[in-house]
Amino acid sequence: MRDLSTDTSLLSLNTATVKQQWNLEQMIDGCVRHRIGAISPWRDQVEACGLGEAAARIRDAGLRVSGLCRGGMFPAADAAGLQANIDDNRRAIDEAVTLGAECLVLVVGGLPEGSRDIARAREQVFDGMSAILEHARSNQMPLAIEPLHPMYAAERACVNTMQQALDICDRLGDGTGVALDVYHVWWDPDLEAQIARAGQQGQLLAYHVCDWLIPTRDLLLDRGMMGDGVIELKKIRGWVEAAGYDGCCEVEIFSSLDWWKKDPDDVLATCVERHQNVV
């Protein structure tokens, strides 16, 4: 495993971690102050800053862009809705290219309104990715499916395990892979084998870290800081790096009850400390 004990260059800030108090400009400046080497912005924050301005600020700060959040959300109730979602994903690819992102992270979407057909929703994910894949390939922008915990299957992501995500990637071929977020997949008894599988195909595109708290007080907005929960972070990183991953560890914490209330500089300082000692 890589030695992170004196490292900050391999730490990436997913901007959701401090989104309640800082805009993108402040997030970039914060990364510079804390010597964090990379950033992963969300599209709404980029839009608020202005795409060109955001790209210039990130470039001038010397930051890597470990990913852009997010594309996806493909399933729709009708063909027009699916096409609108496909068009939005093409725009997301263009934005990722402008920012110099290492991948476009896809939260694929759940059941269309009024539907109970999760198998059909998963096929719409495949159809949507198929429709944007040539555009992504021509722009050399990898598409990273992020499987989400099954509790989000209906509303946010009908792809819930590494195996499901990799099965889609295998059907689509080059230019696709996975964004592994430990929060969503730590519980999977097949996780080690699926990480190894992804590594064999060069499909590990991003690695997100936080922790699972006991109790979890909110199913969306109560993620823990690394080391405050039950996830075996070093073990999973060992599997990921043994599979060939050499990219950033991206901290992504949704925490309306705790970390979003703290001084963002204190949050970033804690991210650095936990990255060096816990992750």
Image (cartoon, rainbow, N blue to C red):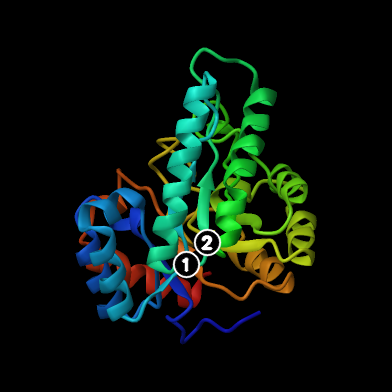
Q: Which residue is drawn at the image coordinates 79% and 66% (left, top)?
A: 200
Residue 88 is situated, as x and y percent measured from the top left of the image, at 43, 41
* Residue 60 or residue 224, whichever sits in front: 60
Q: Which residue is drawn at the image coordinates 42% and 80% (left, top)?
A: 8
* Residue 242 or residue 145, whichever sits in front: 145
Q: Which residue is drawn at the image coordinates 47% and 54% (left, top)?
A: 93
Per the model, the C-alpha gap separating discs 2 and 1 is 7 Å
Which amino acid, by three-letter code, is at mark 1?
A: Ser
- Left or right of residue 160, residue 47 in this image: left
- 84, above or below 107, in the image: above
Mark nearer the N terminus (2 vs 1)? 1
Residue 131 is situated, as x and y percent measured from the top left of the image, at 60, 41
The answer to whether marks 2 and 1 mark residues whose Cβ atoms lie closer than 8 Å is yes
- 68, above or below 2, in the image: above
Q: Quadrant of the N terminus?
A: bottom right
Q: Residue 247 appears in which quarter of the rendering?
A: bottom right
Residue of label 1 = 66
Residue 182 is situated, as x and y percent measured from the top left of the image, at 57, 54
- Left or right of residue 278, residue 241 in this image: right
Residue 179 is situated, as x and y percent measured from the top left of the image, at 58, 56
- 81, above or below 279, in the image: above
Give the residue at the far bottom of this rendering: 6
Point out the frontmost of discs 2 and 1.
2
Instruction: Report if residue 78 is visible in the image.
Output: yes
Residue of label 2 = 103
